Image (cartoon, helix red, strand yellow):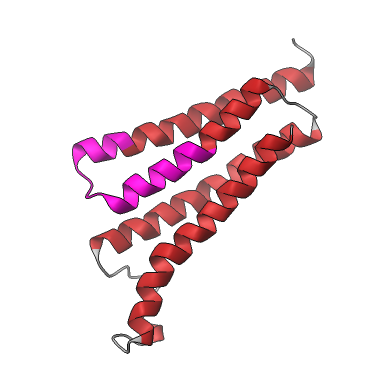
Amino acid sequence: MILPVWMLVGFAAWTVLLLLATVGVYRWSRILTGRVAIREFRADQIEGADWYKRAMRAHANCVENLPVFGAIVLGLYVGNVGSALVNALAVAVLVARIMQSLVHVCFVQTDLVTSVRFAFFFVQIVSFLWLTVILLTELSGIV
């Protein structure tokens, strides 16, 4: 049962690492070299290179999905629900999240690239739903 918890920690670590390695580097390199003032990065107006805009969105995607995964993993942990399938699905969530983020940030978003990115997102959604069904089934005593 501990593997899903580790995958959740990995998801959180990836979220922070993605922020630091993309948005953080982009902003601080401009601030520290005097190209922009720190006040110029406004939350209500996204400016910058295309990859930077994608990086901000990729980070937001992580932040949006982290609580969902966290709630599912908490349920699994509290309910003491675990199996090889649960572990595999938890690993799939993290791997698909990392791949989705990398595809989002590293490639210009053509139809093909966007489809690949969506496929990684779809893996996460299916894994979330499958884990939820497993959790609810185990806790309700249906199986």
Q: Residue at x 68, y 36 (%)?
A: 3
Q: Which sits in the foreground, 12 or 140? A: 12
Q: Is residue 107 left or right of residue 89?
A: left
Instruction: From this view, report whether residue 62 is shown above or below residue 40.
Output: above
Q: Which sits in the foreground, 84 or 81? A: 84
Residue 132 visible to an observer of this rendering: no
Q: Residue at x 70, y 22 (%)?
A: 83
Is residue 30 within the magenta segment?
no
Q: Position of residue 119 (x, y in %)?
A: 36, 31
Residue at the extreme top of the image, as rendered: 143
Q: Quadrant of residue 82?
A: top right
Q: Position of residue 22 (x, y in %)?
A: 39, 63
Q: Residue at x 39, y 71 (%)?
A: 25
Q: Position of residue 120 (x, y in %)?
A: 40, 35
Q: For the stretch drawn in magenta, what is the main secondary structure?
A: helix
- Magenta residues? 94-116
Q: Quadrant of residue 89?
A: top right
Q: Is residue 129 left or right of residue 97?
A: right
Q: Is residue 52 left or right of residue 93?
A: left
Q: Quadrant of the C terminus?
A: top right
